[in-house]
Amino acid sequence: MTHVYLSAALMAEVASEVMDCLVTEVCLADVLRTDDPVLTAAMAAISHEAAQQAMGGPLYVETVARGLIIHLLRRYAAIMQRGPAASSGLGPAQCRIIRDHIDAHLAERLDLAGMAAQLGMTPCLFARQFRISFGSPAYAWVTARRLERARRMLAETGASIKQIAAECGFADQAHLTRLFARELGVTPAAYCRALH
């Protein structure tokens, strides 16, 4: 006999991603006996992987578990939704929170998971709602904010381009130079020379 335990948090996360809205609760139907080949195959794959302990095992099990959850949602679940659908984008307070978070952490590594956590959302749902609200993907918006801060620092401080690159979250001076030139049509050094 094989028992597979799927956490309520993972069920809600997958349901939120699949349905493009915040799902707070998933109630599975109380089914005692069923002949479901998808369930049988998923449980066999998870059981086999647990016995093998092979490379990439946890990732493999999570992938199978997510597929299993989608199947359960389709066939055996009642889903409770909260909040607006993803098509409505982020609310004004959420936009302010994420804008402030990004500005406060531009020098650091920013990723979807970390930004989504600020709003208690899954990365997939956050990415869709961010794009609707801000008009671009999160990575592009963050890059634009970094470039704007670099432009201001070049104009208002005597900091070196290397220091500005670090304080604005670019990998290095070359990374800043490449993106600055692509977006503004001039290198940071040439921009500084034109200002002074």
Image (cartoon, rainbow, N blue to C red):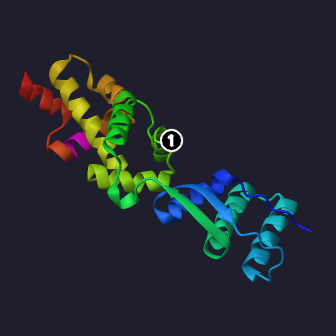
State whether residue 148 is above or below residue 31: above
Residue sitting nearer the eye, 135 or 5:
5
120 displayed left or right of 132: right
Q: Residue at x 51, y 60 (%)?
A: 17
Vertical arrangement, residue 38 with respect to residue 160, above or below: below
**Camera-side residue: 77 or 155?**
77
Q: Pick the quarter of the image with the N terminus.
A: bottom right
Q: Is residue 135 left or right of residue 47?
A: left
Most extreme residue toward the top is: 158
Taking 130 as reference, is 194 left or right? left
Q: Is residue 56 left or right of residue 80?
A: right
Question: Element at badge 1?
Answer: helix
Q: Position of residue 193 (x, y in %)?
A: 10, 26
Question: Which is the main secondary structure of the residues drawn in magenta?
Answer: helix
Which is nearer the eye, 94 or 49? 94
How many marks overall?
Answer: 1
Label 1 packing within 10 angstroms: few (<14), some (14-19), many (20+):
few
Q: Residue 128 sits in which quadrant?
A: bottom left
Residue at 32% over, 32% down = 173
The residue closer to the viewer here, 164 or 30, is: 30
Q: Identify the residue shown where x is 64% and y is 63%.
A: 66
Residue 96 image position (x, y, % from top left): 32, 36
Question: Extreme right residue here?
Answer: 1
Q: Which residue is mark 1?
A: 117
Question: Is residue 140 shown above or below 163?
Answer: below
- Residue type marked 1: Ala
Q: Residue at x 44, y 53 (%)?
A: 83
Q: Dividing the picture into quarters, in which one does residue 63 lie?
A: bottom right
In magenta stretch: residue 135:
no
- Screen quadrant of the C terminus: top left
Q: Which residues are magenta?
A: 178-182
Q: Could you tell me residue 12's position as x and y percent?
A: 60, 56
